[in-house]
Amino acid sequence: MNTIKKYEIAKQMYKTIGVDTDKAIQLLRETPISIQCWQLDDVTGFENRTTGLTGGIASTGNYPDKPKNIDEFRKHAEKALSLIPGKKKFNLHAMYLDTDDKIDRNEIEPKHFQNWVNFAKENKIGLDFNPTCFSHPYSEEGFTLSHQDDTIRNFWIEHVKRTRIISDYFGKELGVRSVNNIWIPDGYKDKPIDQLAPRMRLKDSLDEIFKEKMNNQNHIDAVESKLFGLGSESYVTGSHEFYTNYVKNTNNVIICLDAGHYHPTEVISSKISSYLAFNEEILLHVSRPVRWDSDHVVLFDDETKAIMHEIVRCNALDKVNIGLDFFDGSINRIAATVLGSRNTQKALLYALLEPVQYFKGLENKGDYTNRLALVEEMKSMPFGFVWDYFCELENVPINWLKEVN
């Protein structure tokens, strides 16, 4: 039976429970997924740096065919993008600049990313951005924007200011708003006596960084918290509580919720509605922690589905920016990129194929029995037929692994 016939069967089955599969597919096609560049080269980047990965980041594995230069890297990126259906963005870190200039991070300019803008135009995608506040001599002491040394702190302030300018440039050039997400590794291995002073310095740094207002149509800032990192097990300056309060009191800065940045029993799917209740926009970093923030390849698993269910049930596709954050050097890097991206999109489609209003009606009537039973029955619906049809509409192979192999 071909894909179209299977889809027609699924369409009729979903129709009996009030779900319009054509509408679900259209919403999926219009919802961008921001695909992280760093999976393709184990967070190496293209600076002439002598230090390895620092800041609690660790990419493990030695699978062959890691890109040897930026041209090969972009070819790998193009291959991955060609195997991922739907609307896409590509998420760059500042260390992925493309230049022969000998410059430090506080000197980067839009011209150093012009080839990435050309790449985005050729592939009809948007770009997101991140300052790189790790793997640098000025981050070796474990502090950047909250550092006691004004020289070091001002270096990082200038770096982040410049990433905002570059992010704004991306938005202007591509007509797609760029999200510039700030994550810093700052913290202590053991519990400090003074937990306030570093946070006051971080607040002052952020205030200075965001002092220049930018056009929200082109660019928006995000801040990303973390529970702990290697070397900051007992105290992280940019905690969830710190950034939650910061975005509440600062215009045009949004929170980033990373799936691996919380206690093992915490999940970001339970946090989303708390921000949406206050009409806040949010950024997601969809990842897969295994016992800690280990950034495994995203699976079509319960938490990924729960995250997407929460977005759809809250009718918040226009308020949630969906981005990915994982890296695994032990398997084919292109395959990992494609697999994690497609699993994220599958989870979103799975959520879009739920009769949300009907379930809410049962809940409002107190009919929790039927609500629970029918939610479980949904799991055996022919979701895969709809996904295959979506891939065919997008001219993307259903059996994509053959191409990577």
Image: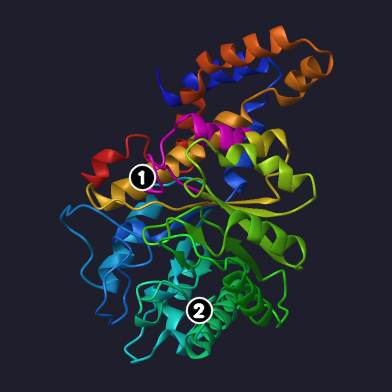
Q: Is residue 291 magenta?
A: yes
- Say which element carries label 1: loop
- Numbered range of the magenta stretch: 286-309
The percent coordinates of residue 306 (x first, y second) are: 57, 32
Checking the image for residue 296, the label placed there is 1
Checking the image for residue 257, the label placed there is none
- Identify residue type, mark 2: His
The percent coordinates of residue 172 (x first, y second) are: 63, 76
Quarter of the image for residue 339 reads: top left
The percent coordinates of residue 298 (x first, y second) are: 41, 41
For the residues labelled 2 and 1, the Cα–Cα distance comes to: 30 Å
- Identify residue type, mark 1: His
Residue underneath mark 2: 147
Q: Is residue 223 magenta?
A: no
| Badge 2 or badge 1: first in the primary sequence | 2
Q: Overall secondary structure of the magenta stretch?
A: loop
Disc 2, disc 1: CB below 8 Å?
no
- In-image side of 338 versus 61 (left or right): right
